[in-house]
Amino acid sequence: METEAGAADEAARRTPQEPTPAPPDPPGRRGIAALSLRYQVVAALALAAVALVACVHVLMVFLHVAPPNTVSKQHSEAIDEWIYPEFEQNWKLFAPNPLQQNIAVETRAEIRTSGGELRTTRWYDLSGQDGAAIDGNVLPSHTTQNELRRAWDVYSSTHDAQNRPTGLRGTLSEQYLRRILVLRLDRLDAAGKGDVVERVQVRSRSTAVTPPKWSAEKVSQKPVYRQVPWWTVTSKDAPLDAGTHLRVQSATGGVR
């Protein structure tokens, strides 16, 4: 018995023992908590700035669309500067009289070639290009759908028949539309290498929507044109052209 017990103890001592598992590492810090204190402060300030801008934007849009009140009247100038033209809101989706015209916006440019000659491009149908980009597209770009259309709509509503601004938004709408035209002409390579875009011109072609077959309404299908005089292009009309090849005249008359 003792011999058997001793043999069992000896065998147990010779059998390798499994190592005791080490305690799990404490969970590591993630997100902002994993950053050093300095970067935590920077991240917190950045998040606070984004939240502040978002709150201000929501407040400005609310005051813009809300019925006139004491606050919106007192700060109307600041609200307009924040909203127009990029964040304008309206209720035309629910308008009782929707648009009954197809309006096409066209543009052309007057270009000074590298040889010093002056040439005028053909008319570019910008609305037609936007329509082709939207047609068949399940998720069309909001910019493609509305940027040019709204810019022309605002310009038309803030200028009289002689293309003179009728309010404070007139000058702003003209600058905004001209900037869009310059950028679009650049994408179309209207100016060749070494050429300079000196002036741009825009016009609209409006045609009435054909009434349905069951309607007795008669409308003229003759296009109606509105043409704006030539606009001189300056460096202010292409502030986002750092990656483009468009060269425009500077405000002082030079070329960049």
Image (tube, rainbow, N blue to C red):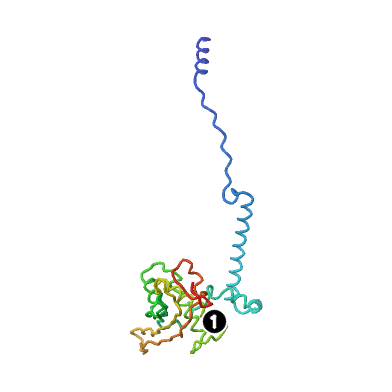
Instruction: Residue at the far left: name it.
Output: 213
Q: Is residue 51 above or below residue 36?
A: below
Tell me if residue 16 can be seen: yes
The residue sitting at 38% across, 71% down in the picture is 133
Tell me if residue 177 can be seen: no
Residue where numbered disc 1 is placed: 171
- Quick one: 161 or 247, which is closer to the camera? 247
Pinpoint residue 220: horizontal percent, then vertical percent: 36, 89
Q: Is residue 126 above or below residue 46?
A: below
Mark 1, Cα crowd under 10 Å, few <14 / some 14-19 / many 20+, is some
Q: What is the quadrant of residue 181 in the picture?
A: bottom left
- Quick one: 234 or 39, which is closer to the camera? 234
Pinpoint residue 24: horizontal percent, then vertical percent: 56, 37
The residue sitting at 62% across, 60% down in the picture is 48
The residue sitting at 61% across, 79% down in the picture is 68
Pinpoint residue 7: horizontal percent, then vertical percent: 50, 13
Lateral position of residue 102 relative to residue 160, left or right: left
Q: Is residue 40 above or below residue 115?
A: above
Residue type, mark 1 in image: Thr
Q: Secondary structure at mark 1?
A: helix
Pinpoint residue 161: horizontal percent, then vertical percent: 48, 89
